Amino acid sequence: MTLIGCGEVPEGASTTDHPTIVSLNPCTDAILVDIAAPGQLLAISHYSQDPAATSMPLDQARQYRATGGTVEEVLALDPDVVVAGSFLAPATRSAFEAMGVRVETVGIASSVEESLGQVRAVAALAGEGAAGDELVGEIETAWDNAASEGASVPTLMWQQGGIVPGPDSLIAQLLEHSGFTLHSAARGLGQGAYLPLERVLADPPQLVLASGEERMLAHPVLREVEGLRYETFDPALIYCGGPSIIRTLDRLTEIREGK
């Protein structure tokens, strides 16, 4: 968990327990939509209203104003706090802080434990600790319910661009907990490694989870490989923690149970 600037509040920023917030990060969008008080979340990132990048159901995201993340757009909303990803440009951060807007950055969670820490920290920032605790409890319940004690299924999580997740990623932990193992990791492939169709066909896993619309990921030949099961997997379930973990575990349980 990376939350920067949690100490002194910049001059001019709100000191109330419920500051107004603009989120520029699709992962914190999903957390704040779940825990923020009515009217507190002024806007979410435009990514959350993009079907290819959202971390929440589109109908939920479209209930909120979205920004492109420009300084001008955000300042026009006059938030107390901007919550962004850890790659926020230094010049953008400086511009917000110069105008008295507190800036917090949140990194990419690589484990469930780290994600739960992010939920608690974002909830504390919003002055909604109880709501954060409730969401943490829901995630922990989903985690317990998804546990699998049977034999693990070698699984290729195949993402847009033909890349695979690394063994230390959040999705890898969720797969392993739910009864699957990373086929790619067993072949020595790390985060973002490219895996072409030819190699998949030459050394197929038991299960392919295709997470993207690229033609290679949906090639008809994949359904003709003996002993290979093919399923699609929503890309929105891969990248973020928080409430996304619940939906990801539910989907993995459905796949494990053959639904």
Image (tube, grey):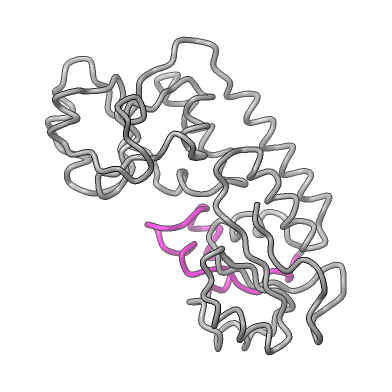
Q: Residue at x 53, y 49 (%)?
A: 240
Task: Give the total of numbered labels.
Answer: 0
Tell me which residue sits at (33%, 40%) in the image.
164
Instruction: Quadrant for the C terminus, please.
Output: top left
Against 7, is 188 above or below?
Answer: above
Q: Up-down: is 214 above or below 63?
A: above
Depicted 60 relative to depicted 233: above or below? below
Residue 235 placement, left or right of 243? left
Q: Nearer the viewer, residue 49 or 159?
A: 159
Please provide percent x and percent y for residue 237.
Answer: 47, 44
Give the left or right position of residue 185, taking residue 79 as reference: left
Q: Residue furthest front?
A: 188
In the rendered image, residue 162, in percent from the top left (x then y), is placed at: 25, 44
Magenta run includes residue 45: yes
Q: Residue furthest right?
A: 16
Q: Residue at x 71, y 46 (%)?
A: 117
The one of 17 and 108 positioned closer to us in this rendering:
108
Is 184 on the left-hand or right-hand side of 10?
left
At a point 83% along the width and 49% down the height, the residue shown is 130
Residue 173 x, y percent position in the rendering = 52, 32
Query: Residue 15 placed where, x, y %?
Result: 86, 75
Instruction: Give the farthest residue toward the top.
Output: 150
Residue 243 vertical placement versus 68 (above, below): above
Q: Is residue 73 magenta?
A: no
Magenta-drawn segment: 38-66
